[in-house]
Image: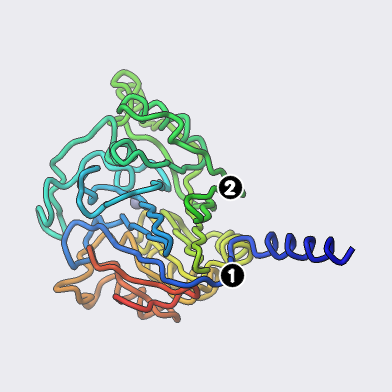
Amino acid sequence: MKGIVIVLAALLVGCAGVMTQPPGAGSVKITPLGSHDGEFCARDRALVFEDPNGTRILYDAGFTVRGPNDPRLGKIDAVLLTHVHGDHLGPAHQPAANAGTCGNPDFSVNVTPTSNTVNIVVGKKARFLVGSDMPMFFAGKVKNAGGDPKQVQLVRFGAMAKVGGVSVATVPAVHTNGVGPEFLDKNLGDTLQANGLTAYVGSPTGYVLGFTNGLVVYLSGDTGITAEQDLVVRGHYKANLAVINIGDVFTTGPTEAAYVINDLVKPNAAIASHANEVATQGGKVLPGTRTEAFMKAAKVPTHVPLSGKTMEFDGSGKCVSGC
Ligand SMILES: [Zn+2]
C-alpha cells in the first residue's frame, strides 16, 4: 500500500507542474539570427534556442536566416512558425551577412513559392511544429521541396509536443494568418489577390517552450494584448522568460508590450522582438526607439537580441551570460 501511495505521489508531482520541470543544471542558449552582425535590425525575428541537452529549435526564420545552409543554424531539431505572414515565413532571404542596411536589408534571394522556412525544414530534416490549419498547407510544400510530409506536426492549442526533452505548446495570438499569393498556385493566388483576399490557414499562434533546466519561455508571435497572456501563459504555463513583439501597427507597441510583461505574463525577464526599426548602432540601443521605450516601461530586466550574440538563461529566466 505504501508503495502504491509513493507511486501515485510521484505521478501527481510529474503531472502537476505542467511545464515547470524540476530546476535542472545548465543554461539555455538563445542566439538571434538577424540581418546585421551585432545589431538589432528592422526585420529581425529569428532566434535559435539550445537546451542544455543540445536540442536546438529555430523560431520564426523570416527573411534573415540565409537559407538552410546558413552556417549560424548548425543542427536544427525543430522549426517553429507562429503564422504565415512573409516576415515570418520568408518569401526571400539575404544573399550574405550584413547585405543592405539595418533599416533596409537586402533580401534579393527569392524563394517563393516554397519559402525560406520550408527550405530550412527540408534541408535540416527537422520537425516542423505548427498549429491551427497550417500542417495541411505545409505538408504539401515540404513534400514538393523533397522532404517527408510527416516532418510537419500539429500542435494545436492545449496540446503539447516534445522535442528532445523540450516541451512545445502553442498559445493564442490575436492577429491574422492569411497566406499571400506568392506562396500559392498562380491561378489561385491571382484570383484571391484580384478579390482582395488571402488564403486563411487558421489562427495565428504564439508558443511556450519548457526546457530541461526549468526555463519556460513565452514566444508571443505577432499579437495584440490578449487575456490568454494572463490566464494561459502565466496562469497555466508559468512562463519565466518572455520574447515579446514590440513593433506597433502590426502587433503590440512598446507601451502595450510592457503592460503585457508587467501585468499579464509577469516573467522574470523579457527579450524585445520584431521592433521594425533600426534599434541599435554598435550594439547600443538608440535613443528615441521603440526598443528604448519598451525597456524603460518594462519593470523586469529586458534584453536586446543582437544578431549572433548568444545569451544564456538559467532555469529561473535570469540571464547568466551574454546580456
Ligand atoms: Zn510580423
Q: In which quarter of the image is the C terminus?
A: bottom left
Mark 2 close to ligand 1, CB under 8 Å: no
Q: Is residue 2 above or below residue 100?
A: below
Q: What residue type is labelled 2?
A: Phe
Evaluate whether residue 227 shows in this view: no
**Residue 110 is drawn in which quadrant?**
top left
* 203 relative position to 94: left or right: right
Q: Which amino acid does label 1 sit on?
A: Pro
Q: Name the residue under label 2.
A: 157
Give the secondary structure at mark 1: loop
- Residue at (51%, 55%) from the top-left corner? 165
Question: In the shown orientation, is residue 95 left or right of residue 147?
Answer: left
Image side of residue 188 versus residue 19, left or right = left
In this view of the protein, can residue 166 be seen by the observer?
yes
Q: Is residue 122 above or below residue 274?
A: above
Secondary element type, mark 2: loop
Query: Which residue is tagged 1?
Result: 22
